[in-house]
Image (tube, rainbow, N blue to C red):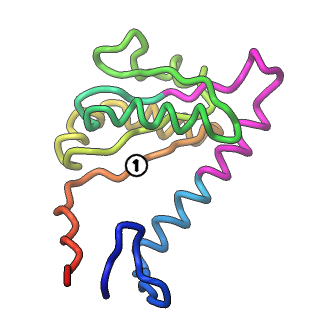
Amino acid sequence: MRWTSAGLLPGETRRIDRRRLLVGAGAAGTLAALGWAGASAVTGDHDRPLALIYRGPAACSGCAEAVAALLRAAPGRFRTGYCGPDEQRQISRSTLTQAAVYAQPGGGNVRPAWRRLRDHADEIRDFVHDGGHYLGFCLGRTSPPASPASD
């Protein structure tokens, strides 16, 4: 298969593996659900639902800001705020009750991230159990994609 700067050459197809299909479908479903959750929670333009986004050492640098931009542009047009160890808002039951969504950006490796967040696991589980929404992004390093074959 030959690649151009725009992708595949005309008439060529690319096979999508099951993992990419499931990840793409899951992301689309999550954004649709968040749009519904945001729209159903909106009572006025000034009172958009709050999405709390973790920002700290259990997420990659810049990931929290990328998630915030995504949620502000989502159909529910969330207002966003950050929570984490160096933020004004800490992860707590009272902080989570103010939010419609808790977002956990990805990056790094699962084991060290879990060590940093496990003290908040019950609070986050209770938040979801009580009707809150959780948006989690993949943790774990992957190897960079192989370079496309050139002619």
Judging depth in this view, the residue of 142 and 139 nearest the camera is: 142
Quadrant in which residue 122 is drawn: top left
Q: Position of residue 98 (x, y in %)?
A: 60, 20
Judging depth in this view, the residue of 136 and 8 nearest the camera is: 8
Q: Which residue is mark 1?
A: 137
In the figure, 11 relative to 92: above or below?
below
Q: Read off the magenta span.
A: 31-52
Q: Quadrant of the C terminus?
A: bottom left
Quadrant in which residue 38 is drawn: top right
Judging depth in this view, the residue of 96 and 123 nearest the camera is: 96
In this picture, residue 9 sits left or right of residue 75: left
Element class at badge 1: loop
Q: Quadrant of the N terminus?
A: bottom left
In the figure, 89 relative to 61: above or below?
above
Which residue is painted at 82% across and 21% down in the image?
44
- The chief SS type of the magenta part is helix
Q: Amino acid at mark 1?
A: Phe
Magenta region includes residue 56: no
How many neighbours does mark 1 have within 10 angstroms: few (below 14), some (14-19), or many (20 or more)? some
Quadrant in which residue 25 is drawn: bottom right
Q: Position of residue 85 (x, y in %)?
A: 29, 19
Q: Position of residue 81 (x, y in %)?
A: 50, 20
Which residue is painted at 53% across and 62% down in the image?
26
